Every structure is written in structure tokens, then in C-alpha cells.
């Protein structure tokens, strides 16, 4: 009898543990969606194309639309920046409340190729940031995003970059609001922004 | 001011026609061939196109060549668990009766070693090599760096 009782307890504990694990997994998969969690405030300290150090405090009061990419990227990055440009145009007068940022994950090469002319070709409002390796890694970690240099003998300079291609939305108080996964139509992002402005 | 003029120029010039033409060769129909303008010649350009295989046997796109770039390659953007990477595509299968799009976020040509910057409104030839259908040369229209595709009346969706 006593064994059965113990078994019951063990089974209950196992069930509880798997439930907790499931809940943790679920929460983990959703993080950092941020709505019902403590405020998550990603940060960065990176120089812009003119060498001026920029941090989230510089943009307090504005929504930040943040993309991590590299200027040598022929497909994903131009496609996303073209979307951002369209969104900024469509926002019209409200666009002053939104600051798009392009954070280089390939900063050394991007500075050499020209960061400002790249962002300006898409939209004059986009600010490009390119720091040193450690600053870049710190910013990416803060946003919980991934990037990695991949050696590829067929790529320009022998390497390419793999990276998280989403757009991240930060609120006027610096709180993480949400991400827009790669390929989210510009109209959907525009709707979301307009509902907040 | 310079930026405004540049933007206005891009907007007024973005009235594609070439990209909407269909080139047919045997059972292959090729349309929506376009590229994005580049800033200078040091960054790789991109090449997008739609290919329809109207035949009854499978084929594959196995290579691209153009005088506009010394090293054009086929690539595929793959987003896996939230990470985008861009592996080289050895060949792009085009099954019998199917259409395949080289389009933003998927298969695309990566044009490395540009001969010169690609300018909005310009065009350049591109030779597509198919495993069975052989070579087909088309003209690629250069759209704005901001373009998301040619604005055709009846595009080949």
C-alpha cells in the first residue's frame, strides 16, 4: 500500500514536472514577445556613419524599427530595407515618430564600402550603425539575435554572413514590443505601426 | 536635397516594360527578369526571373552567365529557425508543367564582380543554361534599389 502511495506521489511529481517543462518551453518559444512579461529593453552603443556614438537614449520618444544586416547582402537585406522605405513613405507625417535603424553585423567591410550611401539609397530616414566587433556582438546579444560569419570561397572576400532577418520594434520608452518575421508584408507592419501612433 | 532628387528620379523612372516581356524558347517561358540598381560596382547585384516549363519532361536551371558580372551564381535564401543564410544552389529544378520563381527571399542569382554599377532603367543580357533546354538569353531590366518586383499588368504569378 505504501509503495502505491509513493508511486502516486512520484507519478504526480512527474506529471507536474512535464507540465512545468511544457509551460517553460511555451514561454521560451514566445519570448521575447514581451506583452505579459517584465519590460525587456534591448540596448546598443554603436557609432553611426559619421562616427557619432548612438544609444537608445538618442531616440527616446520614438518607435525604433531595427534591422540587423550587412550591405553586401544581395537578397534579404535590400528586400527588407525596401519594405522599411515603403513603410516610412506610407506613414506620411507620422513617420517622424518612427526611426529605422540598420545595424551592421559586418561592420568593418560595411564601413569600407560606405554605410551612409547604402541606407540613403533606400530612405533618407534610415540610420546605419556600424561598431567594432565587441560592440556589435553586445548589441546582437541584447536583442537576442544571432549572426555568424560563414567562410565561403565563392562569396566576395571569401565569406558571407548568416543572420536573424526579422525587423524588431522598440517602443518610445525603450521597451521591446515585437518582431516582424522576415517576409511580413509592408502593409501589415504599417497597420501595426499606425495602430500605435 | 540631392537625396530628394535621387528619390524622385527613382520613382519616375520605375515604369518597367522590359521586365514584363515573356521570352519563350522551346517549352521554356521566361518572364519578369529584373535586377536592382547597385551603389557602385563593389557589392553583388541580384537577379530575379520567373521560369515556366510547359513541356512534359523535367528540366533544371544549372547556370547563369552575363557580361555584366564576372562571377554570377545561383543562390537560395534559406530561413531556418529564424536564421537566414544563402547557400549556393547547384541547380534549380523546374519540373514538367511547373513554374519556378527566382524572387526576393528565395532562389536568386547573385552577381559578383560587376563590370559596372547597375543603373535604374538600364538592362543587361543574361544567359540561362538549362540541363535539357540548353541556353536561353534574355534581357534583364534594372529597377530601383527599392523595387520589390516589376509592376506588370499580368504578371506570371
Image: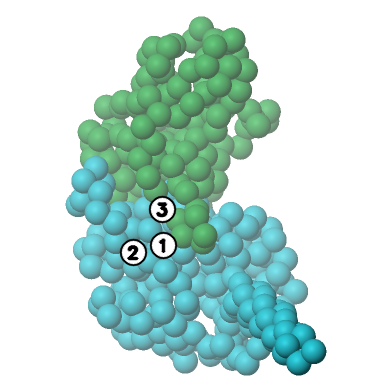
Chain colours: A cyan, B green
In the rendered image, which residue does mark 3 sit on? B85
In the drawing, what numbered circle is on residue A118? none
Q: CA distance from mark 3 to mark 2?
A: 10 Å
User: Is residue A42 rendered to the left or right of residue A158?
Assistant: right
Observer able to see residue B9: no
Q: CA distance from mark 1 to mark 2?
A: 6 Å
Image quarter (top left, top right, bottom left or bottom right) of the C terminus of chain B: top right
Comparing A95 with A82, the one in front is A82
Q: Residue at x 58, y 82 (%)?
A: A176
Secondary structure under tag 3 reads strand
Q: Does the residue at mark 1 contact the one at mark 2 (Cβ under 8 Å)?
A: yes
Crowding at label 3, few (<14), some or many (≥20) Cα neighbours within 10 Å? Answer: many
- Judging from the image, mark 3 belongs to the subunit labelled B
Comparing A97 with A171, the one in front is A171
Q: Is residue B24 above or below residue B76?
A: above
Q: Position of residue A147 (x, y in %)?
A: 38, 66
In the rendered image, which residue does mark 2 sit on? A148
Q: Is residue A10 above or below residue A117?
A: below
Q: Position of residue B26 (x, y in %)?
A: 51, 7
Q: Residue at x 73, y 88 (%)?
A: A3
Mark 3 on the same chain as mark 1: no
Q: Position of residue A42 (x, y in %)?
A: 49, 85
Crowding at label 1, few (<14), some or many (≥20) Cα neighbours within 10 Å? Answer: many
Q: Residue at x 49, y 26 (%)?
A: B93
Mark 1 on the same chain as mark 2: yes
In the drawing, what numbered circle is on residue A163? 1
Amino acid at each position: 500500500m505504501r509503495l502505491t502511495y509513493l508511486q502516486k506521489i512520484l507519478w504526480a511529481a512527474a506529471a507536474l514536472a512535464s507540465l512545468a517543462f511544457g509551460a517553460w518551453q511555451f514561454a521560451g518559444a514566445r519570448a521575447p514577445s514581451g506583452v505579459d512579461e517584465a519590460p525587456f529593453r534591448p540596448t546598443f552603443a554603436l557609432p553611426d556613419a559619421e562616427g557619432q556614438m548612438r544609444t537608445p537614449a538618442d531616440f527616446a520618444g520614438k518607435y525604433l524599427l531595427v534591422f540587423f544586416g550587412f550591405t553586401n547582402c544581395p537578397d534579404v537585406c535590400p528586400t527588407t530595407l525596401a519594405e522599411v522605405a515603403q513603410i516610412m513613405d506610407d506613414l506620411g507625417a507620422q513617420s517622424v515618430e518612427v526611426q529605422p535603424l540598420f545595424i551592421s553585423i559586418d561592420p568593418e567591410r560595411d564601413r569600407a564600402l560606405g554605410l551612409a550611401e547604402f541606407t540613403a539609397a533606400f530612405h533618407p530616414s534610415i540610420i546605419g550603425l556600424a561598431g567594432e566587433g565587441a560592440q556589435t556582438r553586445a548589441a546582437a546579444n541584447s536583442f537576442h539575435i544571432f549572426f555568424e560569419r560563414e567562410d565561403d570561397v565563392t562569396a566576395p572576400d571569401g565569406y558571407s554572413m548568416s543572420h536573424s532577418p526579422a525587423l524588431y520594434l522598440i517602443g518610445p520608452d525603450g521597451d521591446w514590443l515585437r518582431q516582424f518575421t522576415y517576409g511580413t508584408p509592408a502593409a501589415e507592419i504599417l497597420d501595426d505601426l499606425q495602430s500605435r501612433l | 536635397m540631392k537625396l530628394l532628387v535621387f528619390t524622385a528620379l527613382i520613382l519616375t523612372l520605375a515604369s518597367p516594360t522590359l521586365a514584363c516581356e515573356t521570352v519563350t524558347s522551346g517549352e521554356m517561358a521566361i518572364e519578369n527578369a529584373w535586377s536592382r540598381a547597385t551603389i557602385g560596382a563593389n557589392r553583388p547585384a541580384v537577379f530575379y526571373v520567373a521560369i515556366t516549363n510547359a513541356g512534359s519532361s523535367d528540366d533544371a536551371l544549372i547556370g547563369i552567365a552575363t557580361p555584366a558580372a564576372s562571377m554570377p551564381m545561383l543562390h537560395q535564401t534559406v530561413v531556418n529557425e529564424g536564421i537566414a543564410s544563402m547557400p549556393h544552389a547547384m541547380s534549380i529544378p523546374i519540373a514538367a508543367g511547373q513554374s519556378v520563381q527566382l524572387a526576393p527571399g528565395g532562389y536568386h542569382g547573385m552577381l559578383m564582380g560587376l563590370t559596372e554599377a547597375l543603373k535604374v532603367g538600364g538592362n543587361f543580357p543574361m544567359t540561362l543554361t538549362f540541363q535539357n533546354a540548353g541556353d536561353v538569353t534574355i534581357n534583364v531590366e534594372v529597377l530601383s534599389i527599392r523595387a520589390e518586383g516589376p509592376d506588370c499588368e499580368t504578371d506570371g504569378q
